[in-house]
Amino acid sequence: MTHNTPNPNHNLRTLYQVIAFFTAVLVGFAAHGQAGPAETPQTLRWQATDTAGNAVSVPAGGKVSVVVFVRPDQGRSDEAMTQLTALMNGSAGGTGVEPVAVVSGHSAGVGAAKLAGSGKWPWPVVVDPDYQASGLMSVHVWPTTVIVDDAGKLVAHLPGLRESYAKDLRAYLEFARGTIDQAELARRLDANGTVVGTPIHVASRHLHLAEKLLEKGQADLAREELVRGLADAPDDVPLQLTLARVHLMIGEPGEALTGLDAIGADAAAAWRLGTLRGRALAGLKRWDEARVTLIGALKINPDPAEAYYFLGRVYEHAGEWERASEAYRHAFEKSPAAKKLGRGEVAGAS
């Protein structure tokens, strides 16, 4: 019954066709998925149900939305909520602002219920178990605060907890309400030290320069820029994640894995850390570990193209051609390029 025997050469041809098509997409991973305002959509539309069963939407029906992504047992998240609550109870609050807290991850249900019942957050709390909301709003560190005006336009994307957090929030809220213009907003942020002065913002400038260098294909120079940024802000997670990715791009998986090990488990999305870790393990030819890590990352991944691609590499190394081809196909279908194509065009490309 030789007619039913798999033809490895046929599988290989199919596999490499998929790889060749997807390789061009992979180039975009250097910038795609990295923390920063540029990833957040300029117009947001989001709907959810809070822990009380009430509908939550962004934009919030004529109100400015303040969406705070928090971890209930994290000190920085508690401080962000405390400062935001004080701001809302003061002159910056009122009926024109709708705050909402989002708790993401596997234990989000428990954490959200705990937060909602604590009395320290009087506004809606939304459970985000599969990171869909955090993926939509480009959240990679906790806490992160996203401000959206009543038309759905992104006004601010504030990762972490800056020294000027409350002052920045006040300025952005006034801008979102239309009580100050862009020039006044810039003046206030500069006065708050948002443009210059703090390690976080120095790190942000290094990250911005590194991203520009990556766009030009200058990965080695980008690495140097990131290293300089981490000298100023050694615990800056966006810098750490980007440096790990650059190490992977230039064939340094060991350095990437070391950098990822230095990032706290609650400092970045588990799926993002898992994807990069799996890619590093594959680069080190630790195939079994890479397989387990990537499969785990895919279970909680709102942006799975990269994880599927490198899981395909793992299957290919093991000679599991059908699984590899399927993983590569999923990688393409979940990629930004595929999302821009119509379904008929995607089918025609296969």
Image (cartoon, helix red, strand yellow):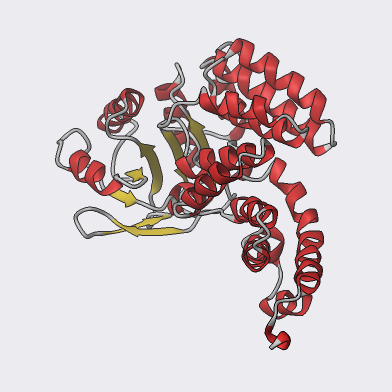
Which of 218 and 281 lies nearest the eye of the viewer?
Answer: 281
Q: Is residue 99 visible?
A: no
Position of 280 relative to 348 (above/below)? above
Residue 298 at what x, y percent from top left?
50, 53
**Which quadrant would the C terminus be assigned to in this image?**
bottom right
Residue 35 percent across, percent down from the top left? 58, 36
Quadrant occupied by the N terminus: bottom right
Q: Position of residue 260 (x, y in %)?
A: 55, 28
In this rendered view, identify the residue nearer to me: 153 or 318: 318
- Where is residue 319 drawn, in percent x and y? 68, 59
Say above or below: 62 vs 202: below
Residue 240 is drawn in which quadrant? top right
Q: Is residue 88 left or right of residue 120?
A: right
Is any part of residue 216 visible from this angle?
yes
- Residue 341 in which image quadrant: bottom right
Q: Is residue 212 left or right of residue 159?
A: right
Q: Is residue 52 above or below residue 68?
A: below
Residue drawn at 57 percent across, 37 percent down: 277
The answer to whether 342 appears left or right of 192 in the picture is right
Which residue is at a point 82% across and 60% down the rendered structure image?
20
Q: Residue at x 58, y 42 (%)?
A: 278
Q: Is residue 283 above or below residue 7?
A: above
Residue sitting nearer the eye, 105 or 156: 105
Q: Nearer the viewer, residue 153 or 257?
A: 257
